[in-house]
Amino acid sequence: MAGVHQEFNPGDIIFREGQEGGSMFVITKGRVKIVRDFGKSNSTLARLSQGDFFGEISVFSHEPRSATAVAEETTVLLRYTSQEIEALVENRPSIAIRIIHLLGNRLKETSDELILLKQQLRSQ
């Protein structure tokens, strides 16, 4: 289960918000920006680099992509399908633990940001 190597140039769209998912990516080289469309403006949700993964939300939720991923520089990715991820997790539980830890960290960061925004709104 090696995944499929894909290369992207700066500015290339890896996937768009709303597209069908079914795969996630691991960055082996380069940087990726995760962007969410909010009507007339975009918001950068994350900047990721070598060793990071993304696209997992649609893999685990079976929902369309929740954001757009854009290569910020020449970027090489490993693409894993849902089926490959399931097989990896079954055969190597340590990978599942790493994914759970990372998802937990992302959830905590999101919760912290939400609390900060609520505090800012209350102080206005």
Image: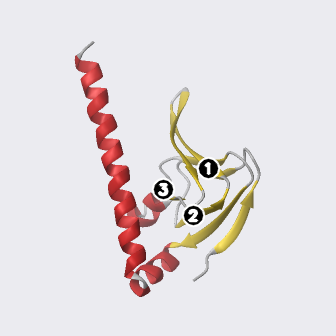
Question: From what the image shows, is residue 91 above or below residue 56?
Answer: below
Relative to residue 62, is residue 48 drawn left or right? right
| Mark 2 / mark 3, whichever is N-terminal | 2
Q: Tell which of 52 and 57 is nearer to you.
A: 52
Q: Nearer the viewer, mark 2 or mark 3?
A: 2
Q: Position of residue 13 (x, y in %)?
A: 67, 49
Crowding at dot 2, Cα within 10 Å, few <14 / some 14-19 / many 20+, comes out as many
- Answer few, some or many: residues within 10 Å of disc 3's Cα (few below 14, many 20 plus, some between 14 and 19): some
Residue 40, position as x, y percentages in the image = 55, 26
Judging from the image, what secondary structure is the residue with disc 3 in? Answer: loop
Q: Residue at x 55, y 73 (%)?
A: 81
Distance in Å between CA atoms under marks 3 and 1 = 19 Å
Residue underneath mark 1:
32
Seen as rendered, the residue at the extreme top is 124
Q: Is residue 120 above or below residue 7?
A: above
Query: Depth check: 19 or 76 in front?
Result: 76
Q: Name the residue: 31% across, 48% down.
A: 108
**Mark 1 in CB contact with mark 2 (< 8 angstroms):** yes
Q: Quadrant of the N terminus?
A: bottom right
Q: How is the image coloured?
A: secondary structure
Left/right placement of residue 34 relative to residue 9 reads left
Q: Quadrant of the C terminus?
A: top left
Task: Give the secondary structure at mark 1.
Answer: strand
Q: Secondary structure at mark 2?
A: strand
The first of marks 3 and 1 along the sequence is 1
Against 107, residue 121 (above or below) is above
Q: Is 70 placed left or right of 113 in the picture?
A: right
Front position in the image: 28 or 110: 28
Figure check: 67 above or below 37? below
Say which amino acid is labelled 1.
Answer: Val
Q: Amino acid at mark 3?
A: Pro
Residue 62: where, in percent of width, then height? 42, 64
